[in-house]
Image: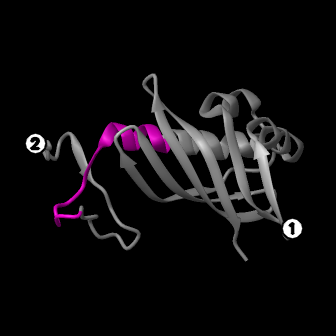
Amino acid sequence: MIDRSADRRIVAMSARGQPSLDQTGHTIMTNSSDIAEITEVVRTYATAMTSGDRAELERIFFERSCEVGHYEGGLLWNTRDEFIRMCEAEASSSAEAWWMIRNISIHGDIAVAHVEDEWAGMHFDTILTMLKHEGAWRVMAKAYRIQS
């Protein structure tokens, strides 16, 4: 039986701000500590990407993770280290990270966060796919699109 007590769980929300429902029509409940931990991973992602903080990016991205999306008309498929090198090259001490979580979906030890963020003067929709491993949420893959 699912524990639905309000003090330990929060309701998962759809993009329209309505409670998400499972296949049987029951409200989906999500552990608030997982939401907080995933939110912290997203915050770290956005701030470390903007500042080019290699150590923080290595901490939240699995070594074999990737970054995939279309850039300047072509498919860009970076390893974690290629992505981090790009962040280091574009780092700005005066830039302030801007990001907003649009949605988080958690299924046991896997999660997907839809993030809207800015980097290097561009505005992105970013999907971070995460796995909770050894007690910590980490990014397995980043897919993005540049908003026009």
> Label 2, on which residue?
1
Q: Is residue 81 above or below residue 107?
A: above
| Residue 23: image location, x then y, percent | 23, 64
Q: Residue at x 68, y 34 (%)?
A: 64
| Residue 111: image location, x then y, percent | 44, 46
Relative horizontal placement of residue 144, taking residue 12 as reference (left or right): right
* Magenta region includes residue 28: yes
Q: Quadrant of residue 7?
A: top left
Q: CA distance from mark 1 to mark 2?
A: 50 Å
Q: Amino acid at mark 2?
A: Met
* Magenta region includes residue 35: yes
Q: Residue at x 70, y 44 (%)?
A: 66
Q: Are marks 1 and 2 in contact (CB under 8 Å)?
A: no
Of residues 19 and 109, the one nearer the viewer is 109
Regarding mark 1 in the picture, which secondary structure is present there?
loop
N-terminal of the pair, mark 1 or mark 2, is: 2
Q: Amino acid at mark 1?
A: Glu
Instruction: Name the image quarter holding the N terminus.
Output: top left
> Label 1, on which residue?
72
- Give the magenta range: 23-39
Regarding mark 2 in the picture, which secondary structure is present there?
loop
Residue furthest bottom as drawn: 148
Instruction: Name the image quarter holding the C terminus.
Output: bottom right
Q: Is residue 104 above or below residue 141?
A: below
Q: Is residue 35 above or below residue 73?
A: above
Residue furthest top as drawn: 134
The crowding category of the residue bearing disc 1, from other C-alpha atoms within 10 Å (few below 14, some 14 to 19, many at least 20), is few
